[in-house]
Amino acid sequence: AFADVPLAPPDAILNLSTMYKSDTSDQKVDLGVGAYRDNDGKPWVLPVVRKAEKQIADAQLEHEYLPIAGLKSFTDAAAVLLLGSDNPAIVDQRVVSFQTISGTGANFLGATFLSRFYPKGTLVLLSDPTWANHKNIFNSASLETQDYKYYDPATLGLDLAGMLSSLQDAPSGSIVLLHACAHNPTGVDPTQEQWKRIADVMQAKGHFPFFDCAYQGFASGDLDRDAFAIRYFIERGFECSIAQSFAKNLGLYGERVGCYHVVTRNAAVANQVRSQIARASRAIISNPPLYGARVASTVLNSPTLLAEWKDSLRFMSGRILDMRAELRRLMLEKGTPGNWDHITSQIGMFTFTGLNPEQVNYMVKKHHIYMTKNGRISMAGLSTHNVQHVAQAIDDVVRN
Ligand code: PMP
């Protein structure tokens, strides 16, 4: 029955990590993976996660099914983390929150809900470029996507004018996917002033914001600051969707801990929306997994663990900032042609180096440094042990 199934292209990132693993050079560096690594290149389990796990183990809990919407102590705390406890949307009970299979599942649940209850034929506007899975997810839920201008290769920064005119030219009432902070893959975020201009155009056009928030606390080290855009749009009166992931900020990658939230007009609308998202989620996962949500809930609901988590976020984002500063310093020291300010002005897990696919290929083949074709490097893959080698390799590639 399946003889005519065409072979799908390999997933670029997974392919990269296979190549990295089979490389026997002792100089090899993995700058592809979007996961935090410590200065020895090792995964890091946050101390608060270990403590929460111990509490959970000691409590001898059962393993019954969760409700369709998930673990309420977790989803409530997750909404507060995004919006702030005094947010009128929370106080007025007009936020709908569902536990999902991490950020990916949150994007997909949102796409599924919108494809059913948003006017037929509405476009989803995606930044050019964006996380490789966005188009895949929205198209899988039968929504059509279109790019909006975002990144300017000439300045290695935000093309604000281009972005605003793309939003202006799109059909009114479009869904606009916005990265809440730490844009993947570019590391380029709008400033607070620029967010205001974006909100102005979106409000005039009646566009619907769909925030993807995969890096709260990871961008600046400050959970509140990284939630600025979301809180600002809500304050301006927008209804919106938010896909939230705890993969990076709690280091719970494989536990798949996330939430999909919809901020609605009022509590009655919230109830209607909640009933339909429940139907959709029931068809996809029936009910979400318990363990990771318990871990997150334990951290989010304990003032002591929450404070310790904030220290860990500052520690992780601080190490990344140190690596940014060091890599830029080395480029300047070597006098490598070009401007390297973007290494420190871009934020979050990734830097868009500006290297082209041919140069990337050279980085892999000659220097054993693995990065995605678009020139993106994960700053978490850098360490005091390998940053010299990486800087030397970039210098070599740029000069040759
Ligand atoms: N959105 C963006 C922008 C991401 O970078 C990621 C992680 N790479 C995700 C969503 C989803 O990740 P996860 O499903 O692991 O939470």
Image: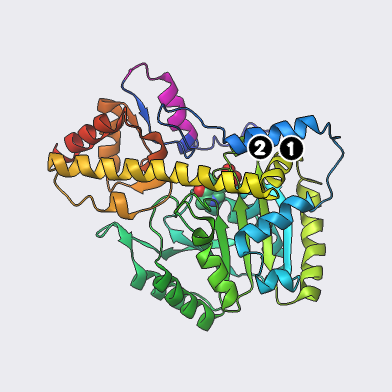
- On the picture, is 142 further left or further right than 159? right
Q: From the viewer's perspective, is 363 left or right of 20?
A: left
Q: How many marks?
A: 2
Residue type, numbered disc 1: Tyr
Q: Quadrant of the C terminus?
A: top left
For the record, the magenta segment spans 14-26
Residue 88 placement: quadrant = bottom right
Q: Residue at x 19, y 52 (%)?
A: 339
Q: Which residue corresponds to mark 1?
A: 291
Residue at 54 percent of width and 48 percent of height: 310
Q: Which residue sits furthest bottom?
A: 204
Please check the rendered image and state whether residue 180 is part of the magenta-colored stretch, yes or no: no
- The location of residue 395, given as percent across then percent down, is 18, 37
Marks 1 & 2, CB-CB < 8 Å contact: yes
Picture quarter containing residue 160?
Answer: bottom left
Quickly name the residue at label 2.
255
Measured as percent of width and height from the top left, residue 230 is found at: 55, 66
Q: Nearer the viewer, residue 302 or 270?
A: 302
* Most common SS among magenta residues: helix
Query: Residue visible at 62% across and 64% down?
Result: 84
Residue 16 is covered by the magenta coloring: yes
Amino acid under disc 2: Glu
- What is the distance, in whole Å, between disc 1 and disc 2 at their CAs? 7 Å
The color scheme shown is rainbow
